[in-house]
């Protein structure tokens, strides 16, 4: 019997508990509450923090497009990468950021997952009216925990998302301030940081992801949008109050998928629908729910058909290998959450995609896609900028000063030489002055 083909590379299993998106938000809250045990990333203490989430900006994409984003490229020079989590998609990643928990605990396990016992899928971006978001994801969010600790929590994002199921499930507890333009995002975030001596402000921008989906990453439309995002980050940094910290990250990266890379489950000759009751997830990360008694046969078929195009696991194998969270962690993939995971889980390798042209025509036509365990999708930036102005000087809001270098214009901000950033001003023994009281 011939050995089944497998992808030529190994999957990037998320570094839960060490350097994942869940660790970032948990560490940010810990840095504001002096909880050293929960500060996995060792972030410096801060009373005011702004977290900018740029949908779709993978670390590899930032490194490959530095000319379009000089400010972010400066911050990325000596930064650390994070892993998004699985699936590497907006629903799951925003839940990880919003709760500080791994996917196997918060239970937001992808774009589309089965509602146990209902025979249908829940779409995390288009929430069904009959499913209570708080019941689906009952764990406290970092914003709710911040409010309990006396920290003002504010979420700045498009107005359309204010009462969405995803917001209520994963991001509840913050004052929601709607902003439908880049300038408004920057202005409202800056105002929120200035309103309280202790504040956590989360800012979300999704247009880069939309450009990547429609036109492909590194396309002219995507690159021009990245330049706008870079300016947003620069404006947020230039308006930080003294002592505040700006963190910049993303929910996932993205890969371009050509027409020849798409494997259609709705094709006339496709065996990928045999024994399948529901097809969930998305094109780069599929949850496959088998008909009763057909799970083993579906697993064998998907492995045979996909071969080197995807890593294909049973539910038990994916959980054991740590795709959704560290194995053995209390609460990881308990019975209720595990039922949302497919009997078979497939994560695409290379630039392959498992589409459903009839059932998902819009999603199947996308150029840029994400969700899997490749480096391009898993690695996201973790950038930091600390306001290091002379005490008593009010930071100016507006264009940042620039200087000319051989490779073009750059903001006059210090390139970080190590993490965490050095304190400002330097201590008296180093010739600095203590902060004004």
Image (cartoon, rainbow, N blue to C red):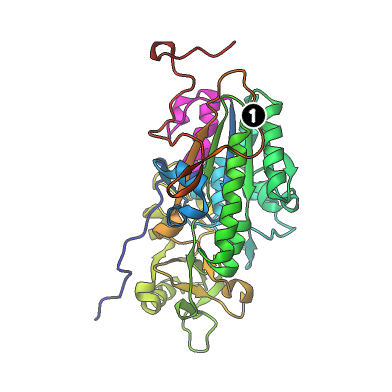
Q: Is 200 placed left or right of 291 in the picture?
A: right
Residue at the disc numbered 1: 199
Is any atom of residue 20 visible in this view?
no
Where does the N terminus fall, quadrant-wise?
Answer: bottom left
Q: Is residue 55 above or below residue 265?
A: above
**Measuring 72% from the left and 44% from the top, which residue is drawn there?**
184
Where does the C terminus fall, quadrant-wise?
Answer: top right
Q: Is 332 placed left or right of 116 in the picture?
A: left
Percent from the top left, x then y, of residue 18? Answer: 39, 40
**Measuring 62% from the left and 25% from the top, which residue is drawn there?**
149
The front one of 202 and 244 is 244
Q: Residues within 10 Å of mark 1 (few under 14, many from 20)?
A: many
Q: Is residue 183 magenta?
A: no
Percent from the top left, x then y, of residue 290? Answer: 50, 71
Q: Is residue 80 above or below residue 313?
A: above
Q: How many marks?
A: 1
The front one of 348 and 315 is 348
The front one of 270 and 194 is 194
**Measuring 62% from the left and 18% from the top, which residue is drawn there?**
392
Q: Is residue 117 above or below residue 137?
A: below
Percent from the top left, x then y, of residue 414? Answer: 46, 34
Q: Is residue 291 above or below residue 100?
A: below
Q: Is residue 36 magenta?
A: yes
Q: Which residues are magenta?
A: 22-47
Residue 364 falls in image quadrant: bottom right
Percent from the top left, x then y, of residue 97? Answer: 55, 44
Is any atom of residue 410 visible in this view?
yes
**Measuring 74% from the left and 58% from the top, which residue is drawn there?**
130
């Amino acid at each position: 019997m011939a050995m089944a083909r497998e992808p030529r590379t190994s999957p990037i299993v998320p570094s839960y508990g060490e350097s994942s998106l869940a660790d970032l938000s948990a560490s940010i809250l810990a840095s504001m509450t002096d909880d050293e045990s929960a500060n996995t990333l060792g972030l410096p203490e801060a009373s005011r923090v702004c977290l900018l989430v740029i949908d779709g900006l993978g670390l590899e994409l930032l490194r490959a497009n530095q000319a379009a984003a000089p400010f972010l490229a400066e911050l990325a020079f000596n930064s650390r990468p994070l892993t998004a989590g699985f699936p590497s998609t907006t629903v799951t990643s925003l839940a990880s950021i919003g709760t500080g928990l791994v996917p196997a605990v918060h239970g937001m396990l992808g774009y589309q997952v089965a509602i146990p016992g209902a025979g249908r899928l829940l779409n995390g971006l288009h929430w069904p009216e009959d499913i209570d978001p708080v019941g689906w994801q009952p764990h406290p969010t970092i914003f709710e925990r911040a409010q309990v600790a006396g920290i003002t929590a504010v979420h700045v994002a498009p107005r359309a998302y204010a009462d969405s199921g995803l917001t209520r499930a994963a991001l509840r507890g913050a004052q929601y301030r709607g902003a439908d333009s880049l300038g408004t995002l920057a202005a409202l975030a800056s105002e929120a940081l200035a309103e309280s001596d202790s504040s956590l402000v989360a800012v979300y921008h999704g247009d880069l992801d939309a450009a990547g989906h429609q036109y492909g990453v590194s396309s002219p439309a995507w690159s021009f949008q990245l330049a706008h995002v870079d300016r947003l980050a620069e404006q947020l940094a230039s308006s930080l109050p003294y002592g505040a910290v700006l963190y910049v990250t993303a929910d996932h990266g993205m890969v371009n998928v050509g027409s020849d890379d798409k494997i259609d489950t709705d094709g006339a000759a496709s065996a990928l629908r045999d024994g399948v009751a529901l097809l969930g997830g998305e094109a780069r990360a599929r949850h496959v729910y088998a008909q009763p008694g057909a799970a083993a046969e579906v697993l064998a078929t998907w492995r045979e058909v996909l071969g080197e195009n995807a890593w294909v696991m049973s539910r038990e194998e994916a959980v054991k290998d740590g795709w959704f969270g560290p194995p053995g962690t209390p609460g990881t993939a308990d019975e209720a959450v595990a039922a949302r995971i497919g009997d078979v889980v497939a994560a695409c390798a290379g630039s392959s995609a498992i589409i459903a042209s009839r059932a998902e025509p819009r999603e199947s036509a996308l150029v840029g896609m994400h969700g899997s365990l490749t480096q391009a999708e898993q690695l996201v930036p973790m950038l930091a900028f600390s306001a290091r102005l002379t005490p008593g000087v009010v930071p100016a809001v507006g264009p940042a000063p620039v200087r000319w270098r051989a490779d073009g214009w750059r903001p006059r901000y210090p390139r970080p030489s190590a993490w965490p950033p050095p304190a400002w001003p330097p201590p008296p023994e180093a010739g600095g002055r203590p902060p004004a009281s």
